[in-house]
Image (spheres, rainbow, N blue to C red):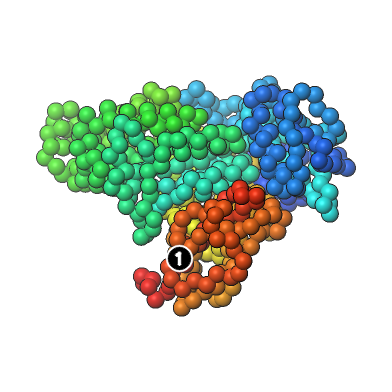
Amino acid sequence: MKRITMFRRAFLASVCLLGIGAVPRANAADQPLKILPTPKSLTLSGGAMPLTATSRIVAVDARLKPLAEILSREIFLLTKLQLATATGAAKAGDVVLKIDAKLRADQDILAVQKQEVVRTRDFAHTIDVSDKAVVEGWDYRAVCEGTATLLQAIADKGGRFEIPKMKVKDWPHADFTGTMVDVSRQQIPIDSLKAVIETCRLWKIRYCQLELSSDEAFTFPSTAFPKLGTKNEAMHNGVVPRVYTLPELRELVAFADARGVTLVPELNTPGHTEAMGRSMPELFGGPKIMDMTNDAMYQSLGTLVGEMCDVFKSSPYFHIGCDEMYYYELAERDRTATYFEKNGMTKIDDLIIQHIRRMNDIVRKHGRVTLAWEQVARPSHLKEYKLPAELAKQIISMCWFPGGEAGELQKQGCTTITVPWDLGAPLSEWNMYLCNGAKLAPESNTLGASQTMWHMSASALMGDFLGGKLNGSTMEGYIRSLGIRTERTWGPTTPVVDADYEKRLVESRDLQSRLILPVKIEGTTELARPRWAVLGGHYINDQAEVRLSIVPGAAEGEIHFTLDGTEPMATSPVYSAPISIEKTTALHAALFTNGKQVGHVSRAFYEPLKKATK
């Protein structure tokens, strides 16, 4: 621990020498407003702008009308004030939304633009609160990020609401502030994905990656290959993932785009493809890995990537997997040796590099940049290859193994994204450059950081990953509340005091609950123990009582619930007394106001201890 602390001090000193530390910033420890993540620059000028029923949200640019409607709804949930949306001239008390493509950040930002990794000063936003609250951004998403700060700054003064007079300038330190949701091992409902998206909006998480395929299931609705997904299974005896519909996914992408969050598709190749192989062995089958000697397969993969890109139109990235490539059986087949001889190859490494090249060509043909897990270029399982220089430059590696591989990959010319393996270190001793044993320089090609949600059930996602122990489950490894690392990705040099950050995180989660997860689930009798964190929920003894409540400060209404794993509706039972649970039960609950759902479904799972597998 002492060694890490010493490195952190040296790291902060180095970024100051490089000029990064010279940017005006609001010290997280001294910040009077409990905003997460901390803006680069925030100055309070004294006083406040009252927010009243006559305030409006004025979209100066017509492109901002969807955001104006979203912000109006969010402010209503927090204040009960129904602000009208408008265009044209603003008046005192209004919230004004503007786009200014000339707005520049005060630092270079590593990003992908036009399929190239570049340094840019795009993406900034400003907030100026005087008699009006003006949020101005470089583009639509930058304005979204400014309004997320504005939401967190709204103060309740005994039923009167106000926004402190202030000036803010902010921007992401790097483009890829992200998370990943695994929708291919246990069923994750669309409602839960929308909760993730809205949480990303609140905490300025710009990208949400969806792992759409794995050994267990294939969940993308391919029109060209409708058999895919017909032989899905589930991990950990969970709910079998279903294939989403095209209208569902298109609407989900639009939902995310309107909130400044970009959905990134992941198609696992060449490993973790057994679900594809079970459904269509003639095209995608192989011995624990795709048969990369089947040249005809790549035309089909090109079609599939094209279908996904057509749905996920706004994403500049496409993820091709390349994790845990178990190639031994493929390498030992006679037909593989014949293929090697025919194509001038000598070992399996040549075949893997050919696969990576082919997939990268497909992705770039569709105007995207290739993302892959670090094994795309990191030697493993006795492989010794290195990617050719042109491939290393074009493929961005997401590094999550705890061996410091990001530094080695960057030496090969790769751009990397930090993915924490273990979140046990205090926040003050962690950032996107200092993680997984890697010690990267601020000028390195580090595109950002992302937080993974592998294997989780919907109840674990909603309870642990988003809710921060909403349902009392423990958290382990990388399974932590989504907001826990946002601070040191958005601003890796922002000074942080851990105790202060925990307080801010609690307050920010409270805001998140009022907006997104307004129903709280708690046990009234002692539960036996939490289940494994990726499963979510609890083991129970003979009987448990569970109570539901509306989070303080959330909208008014009725809680409707189900006990059979279905989604609650306005016609579902109304909660009025503690619920007695004696058998395996999936409890889903949501808040309804005037017959319409408010926020998203809270989920918990209970299993009798006597039936639990040891």
Q: In this image, 436 relative to 172: left or right? A: left
**Is residue 207 among the parts visible in the rendering?**
yes
**Is residue 408 among the parts visible in the rendering?**
no
In the picture as drawn, the residue positioned furthest to the front comes out as 571
612 vs 5, nearest the viewer: 612
Which quarter of the picture shows residue 234? bottom left
Q: Give the x, y percent position of residue 370.
A: 41, 32
Which quarter of the picture shows residue 272? top left
Q: Amino acid at mark 1?
A: Thr
Q: Residue at x 84, y 29 (%)?
A: 91
The residue tagged 1 is 585
Q: Residue at x 47, y 49 (%)?
A: 189
The quadrant of the rendering that contains the C terminus is: bottom left
Q: Give the x, y percent position of residue 371.
A: 43, 35
Q: Is residue 541 above or below residue 479?
A: below
Q: Residues within 10 Å of mark 1 (few under 14, many from 20)?
A: some
Q: Residue at x 53, y 42 (%)?
A: 178
124 vs 555, nearest the viewer: 555
The quadrant of the rendering that contains the N terminus is: bottom right
Q: Give the x, y percent position of residue 2.
A: 59, 58
Q: Give the x, y percent position of residue 451.
A: 51, 47
354 vs 156, nearest the viewer: 156
Which quarter of the picture shows residue 612? bottom left
